[in-house]
Amino acid sequence: MNLSSKTDTTQVAASNKPDGSDDELEARKRSAEDLSPSKQSEQPTDKLEPDKSVEFINFDSDDVEVEDDNLIRSRIKSDQWHEFDNLRSVLGKNCPALASITRLCRVATTSINAKDEDAVVAVLKNKGIEDPLEHFMFHREYHLERVRCPPRKGVKASHYLQETLEYIKGNEHFKEYVTPDLEKFLSGWARRCRQGRYEDLPDVEMYNHIGYDSNNLPLWHRRRGSKAENFHQKMHVAAGPFGVGMETGHYLHVLLAYMYNVSAGINRCCEPDFGHFDLWYEDRIGSRIGEIWGVQLFPNRTNQII
């Protein structure tokens, strides 16, 4: 219920207060919360079952600045998983602590859905895989398709990364692997988190349920990635080994950019997929149907003709 700014919320709360003592009311409230269906919904959680092989630092610290979930710090986004690839390069793929430090950084920067992850771990154990952390290192795509891991908000992720760095510097098992390059890398990662480079946008849904696998685990389509990086790769392929003139190169760039934007609208903004890029035809059809029958044919698409 929306209340206007002039509404006396104190009177409204008093009028809705049931009879009974404060202790009884508090008990009823706790009971209602325990039975609430919202408590049983699939919501991402920041809490994980502790890994006995790794000592986790406290990520529920009260020292973290509270942020507005709807704050858009930046619309310039990067793929956070490239940071994990870079971490492997910094530590070396044969580093004994790579898996554990990767796990710490993952918990520090992502809100892992505990229900999804528990289901994946149970399936892996039935297949004889006792170490899901090692399986994640070499089969990351398998986990990312089945476990929702939205990035944490910028200040929180930055704070946790800095705490992770201090932790591994003081841990007797990890401190021998700390180098100036690792410190510089984690500090830069924390700075990029504060800039909002990895945060989800509140007006774009980044996960879409697309079905189930053979083990009845839910599959999720992720609408995130390094589209800018892939774009320059596609430009290189589009030009081919042949030399092209300035005008041809310009039109090729414009055409490819347009097609890429159409694909991004389909993958990230739930726009309809017509199977082609001549969207002006669909806009003309939609505008005529709107004029004749007064209906919007494709609600998720912005008609450029109207």
Image (cartoon, rainbow, N blue to C red):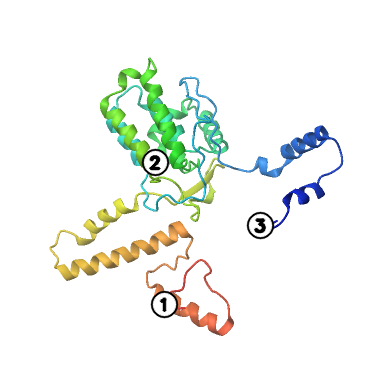
**Residue of label 3:** 5
Q: Which residue is mark 1?
A: 281
Question: Nearer the observer, disc 2 or disc 3?
Answer: 3
Q: Position of residue 181 (x, y in %)?
A: 26, 29
Give the amino acid at mark 2. Cys
Residue 9, relative to residue 306: is it above or below? above
Q: Is residue 32 left or right of residue 269?
A: right
> Which callout, 2 or 1, points to the residue nearer the camera?
2
Going from N to C along the chain, the mark reached first, 2 or 3, is: 3
Residue 164 position in % (x across, y down): 41, 27
Q: Earlier in the sequence, mark 3 or mark 1?
A: 3
Asked whether the beta carbons under mark 2 and mark 1 sit within 8 Å of each other, the answer is no
* Residue type highlighted by circle 1: Tyr
In the rendered image, which residue does mark 2 sit on? 193
| Residue at x 27% of width, y 67% of height | 254
Q: Is residue 188 above or below residue 167?
A: below
Residue 89 lies in quadrant: top left
Judge whether 11 appears above or below 260 on screen. Answer: above
Label 3: state its secondary structure.
loop
**Residue 106 shows in this picture:** no
